[in-house]
Amino acid sequence: MAYDWITDALEETWASVEAALRDRAPADFDAPTACPGWSVRDVLSHLLGIEVWLRGGAVPDFEGPMPAHVKNSMGEFNEAFVAAHRGESGAEVLAQFRAAAAASIAALRAMSAEEWDVVGWSPEGERPYHRFMETRVLDSWIHLQDIRDALLEPADDHGPGEEIVINRFESSLPFVVGKKMSAPDGTLVRVNLTGRLARSVMVAVANGRAGAVATANEEPTFEVTTPVALFWRRCAGRISADAFLGASATDVRGSREMARAFAEALAIMI
């Protein structure tokens, strides 16, 4: 079937969310997460709300002023779904999530290749549907880790979701260096990731544009070596630039000033 690897990643990630929250005490759903203003229940409600909306559900009405952590229209959209479930128990929200996830997986597995390639709305702008669903993997997998961290049960998750997340963040490095850092021509960055999905990526800036390069004769302007887990956490904004650079497992060589700018710019998740 078309894009089975994306559907497989969503199914495994959502099953892991359900497993992490199954038979939990009510207080566990109130644990605060790394997402400002959101508890475990709120993160679960967010995941639920998106799937309900994608299957044709309406956006709930939101009463009163938006909280301070809401910064844009997408945040308002998300907050409406989160607020709608705050009066429900965690177990009730989990049951709804389980049903919505199953419906979404069934719908995705029934889609044709042509439907997967249709261009339409996504949080990144107009994109093919398969790109949008990749973004759903990214969002869902990061929130799975938010839930685990909030419950003080972090876990390695070496499935297809992690691969999509790391590949997506790797592909964003030219944007980080060229656009967010505004690095000058001649800048060469080398990022070495350690762990199961280890890789070494170089980004060069020439003629005002940054792009990945396979080889380079010159020494990097700066080089960062860090574990995959720290890399995705910084890209997702779950740890600060100081925590990323100051971690004992992170090594920086070359321009410390440029490396600092890189670490600041590396938080790219909406």
Image (tube, helix red, strand yellow):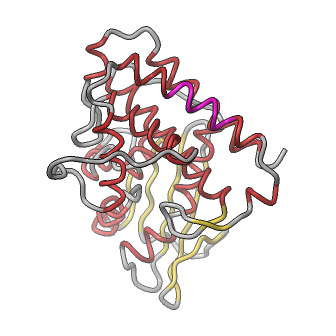
Above or below — where is 140 with respect to 94?
A: below
| On-image quarter of the N terminus | top right
Q: Residue at horizontal 77%, vertical 42%?
A: 4
Residue sitting farthest toward the right: 1
Q: Residue at horizontal 47%, vertical 83%?
A: 186
Q: Position of residue 74 (x, y in %)?
A: 36, 58
| On-image quarter of the C terminus | bottom left
Q: Nearer the viewer, residue 267 or 122?
A: 122
Q: Nearer the viewer, residue 57 or 176?
A: 57
Q: Residue at horizontal 29%, vertical 41%?
A: 35
Magenta stretch, residue numbers: 97-105
Residue sitting farthest toward the bottom: 207
Assess whether residue 99 is covered by the magenta stretch: yes
Assess whether residue 203 is covered by the magenta stretch: no
Q: Is residue 54 left or right of residue 60?
A: right
Q: Is residue 35 left or right of residue 163?
A: left
Above or below — where is 149 with respect to 142?
A: above
Q: Nearer the viewer, residue 219 or 205?
A: 205
Q: Is residue 22 left or right of residue 159?
A: left
Above or below — where is 163 with respect to 114?
A: above
Quadrant position of residue 152: top left
Quadrant position of residue 34: top left
Q: Position of residue 95 (x, y in %)?
A: 48, 20
Q: Position of residue 252 (x, y in %)?
A: 38, 55
Q: Position of residue 263 (x, y in %)?
A: 34, 58
Q: Residue at horizontal 19%, vertical 52%?
A: 66
